[in-house]
Image (cartoon, helix red, strand yellow):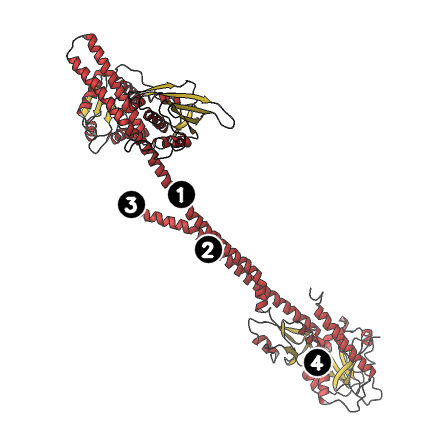
Amino acid sequence: MDDLNPSPRGRRARRRRWAALSCLAAAAIVVPAPVPANSPTTLERAIQANFLFKFAPFVEWPPAAFSGTERNFVICVVGEDPFGTLLNEVVRGQKMVGRPVVVRRAGGEAGPTGCHILFAGHSTDPGYAPFATTEGQPVLTVADKSAGPSGAMIEFVRQSGRVRFQIDDGAARANGLKISSKLLGLAIAVNRK
Amino acid sequence: MKQATPSRLSLGKVVGQMATPLSAVLIAFLLLAAGLAAAIQLEQLGRVEKLRQTTVQAQVLANGIAAPLAFEDDVALQEYLNALKADPQIVAVAAYDGKGAFAAGFARPPARLPKRAEEASRDAPPAALAVTVPVKQGGTRLGSVYLQSTMDSLSRRLTRYLGIAVIVIAAAVLIVMLAASYSSLRRAHQALQAEIASRQQAEEALRQSQKMEAMGQLTGGVAHDFNNLLMVASGGLDLMERTQDAARLEKLRAGIRQALDRGAKLTRQLLAFSRRTPLNPEVVDLRERIRGMDALLERSLGESIGVTMHLPADLWPVEVDASELEVAILNIALNARDAMQKGGTIVIEGANRPVHGDLPDRVQIAVTDSGAGIAPELVNKIFEPFYTTKAVGQGTGLGLSQVYGFARASGGEVLVDSIVGRGTTITLLLPRSLLAPRESDRPAEPVGASGRQRILLVEDDDTVADTVGGMLTTLGYEMERVDNGDAALRRLERADDFSLILSDMIMPGEVGGMELALRIRKHWPHLGTMLMTGYSAAAASAAKEGVPLLAKPFTIQDLSVHLMAALDHSKA
């Protein structure tokens, strides 16, 4: 009942939240974040590792993504790995949709297979196109906007010294992924096309 | 045992008197207890409901803050939590991340926030309405929400219950007050009843003394009359001894018989008259009743006063107390006599007075004298108790007040019509009864002696025993006499070869006549019994037990008839 008919208070809160978020989004659009020259700090990397894992609960993969022989929930890292052991620490013992979460790193040309989340780090390789292989597949692609390839569905950005992210929801939907509106609401910018 | 009875009675009375107030107080207490129980129940239900509400609020909150909590957007998180500040009953809200560390929250003093999620579920006071719900997204636990809310303040809740409390208390007070007034009414009622009872007793005593007053008036005349009767009897016997002339003997015997009959009739009327009886209305044939008083009136009024009666045979019956009626007639007659110092005639007239206006059918009995009359200013006073014009010692002033009381008690009235120097008419008006009067006992037809049966005569007085024994022998019965009840029982134990036991009622010894009759009925049911007495009170008790009774004095004819009846009865 309460879920169907939210109390006025709840509605008001939601409205207020939306107002706040749209303000933030407007600010992000009006004042474009300056592209920082330096690479992310250790703290930022730790937060990114944490976020990378936490995106998973807010994203819905199509059933086909789990139909193969793979029994784990796989987070792949390609290019330069900015996390080191941080990411492994975060996912240790965690489960996603009933599967143990594992991290795979592959520097090979073919890229890792069976990924559910693909993080692409910085690379000096001129032919570096980590997202080309996952085109049309239900893989959530993530990258650091300031220190990684472009074209990821979720891109980390720095805003007021905090780690935030922007989302290309159109690309995600094109690849069969559904991103929760809660996550979209928190993004500083959303491309809905 | 006998001593214990009054105390137990009074205890029962006290319990009876206290029962109503006690039960009322009990009911009032029950009402209060029920009100309290309802309030407590309501309070608990309210608490459960509040807890449920708080849990739902926490769940809604947990759902909303999943993303801000996961991605550490403190601004959005605080926005969510602050939204709950609008509810004054929410005293503390906190969000904890997946590791249990405090993320954001607020608390109103004196409530405080748990530092970590584990403390929240552990430290919550048992009475507090605190809930902790997990924040989950896609099956992954991202943290938890702690929400503590409070019930309405005590004063607000009390205000809510005040209305009910006032009603319940008012009802309880009302019940107790009603019970108190009921019990005081009850006490007043009991006092009134006691008063009524004592008044009834006093009235009863007054009636009897009024009757005795009339008796006193009678006694002189009766004694005189008895002397005359005794004179006739004893003189007659003397003369019988001195003559052999059969015709004269017969004449003397008839004279003695007549004198004795009159004496017997007179004493019978006197006994009936003086009997102490409760007021007992019966349907009465006025003509028969008043005519039956002839001897009484004649003797009590004296020789200078004549009595004339005009009582038509079709006089309607009335429903009155017969003995009170006789006393009233006698009182009016005595008053008439006293008004006629030089003698004269009293006329008693009866007449039917049919419906007139709104007055019902009534029967009128008018007693007229040709005496001094009553002055008009005194007419209203003559019915007052103790009002008398007679000298001290000659009248009590109760006579005419009895007449008035009788008339009112019977639903009738008394009229006085008097002309000074010419005479007075006192008229009794009594309502007609539609019932038929009871057949009065007709004198039994003399029946000749018969039978060859043995009769046991129980009589302590030798003279009476000789006379009755002689009568029995003359009637042809075999007779045996014993002195008292004990002797009779001993005789019967030896051999019960009798047809009937004829016993006096009042006798010396342990076994009186009544007791004897009851024992015979029990041990020798085939034997008949008959009691004889000259005492009217004893006669009533015999009649109650259904034992045949022969009233003294009786003639040999009376005896024979009663014996026949009793023997027939015992055979049947």
Relative depth, front residue between A60 and B32: B32
Q: Earlier in the sequence, mark 1 or mark 2?
A: 2
Q: Quadrant of residue A74?
A: bottom right
Q: Position of residue B143 (x, y in %)?
A: 66, 77
- Gap in Å between the C-alphas at discs 3 and 1? 25 Å
The nearer-to-camera label among 3 and 4 is: 3
- Gap in Å between the C-alphas at discs 4 and 2? 64 Å
Circles 4 and 1 on the same chain = yes
Q: Is residue B386 above or below residue B495?
A: below
Which quarter shows the C terminus of chain B? top left
Circles 4 and 2 on the same chain = yes
Q: Earlier in the sequence, mark 4 or mark 1?
A: 4
Q: Is residue A173 above or below residue B404?
A: below
Is A146 on the left-hand or right-hand side of B434?
right
> What residue is pinned by disc 2?
B25
Q: Earlier in the sequence, mark 3 or mark 4?
A: 3
Residue B74, labelled with which disc? Answer: 4
- Name the outermost residue toward the left: B242
- Gap in Å between the C-alphas at discs 3 and 4? 97 Å
Residue at 32%, 26% in the rendered image: B338
Q: Disc 4 on helix, strand or loop?
A: helix
The nearer-to-camera label among 3 and 1 is: 1
Residue B193, labelled with which disc? Answer: 1
**Chain ID of residue with mark 1:** B
Q: Disc 2 on helix, strand or loop?
A: helix
Q: Residue flagged by tag 3: what amino acid is it?
A: Lys
Residue B2, labelled with which disc? Answer: 3
Is B530 on the left-hand or right-hand side of A83?
left
Q: Residues within 10 Å of mark 1 (few under 14, many from 20)?
A: few
Q: Residue flagged by tag 4: what amino acid is it?
A: Asp
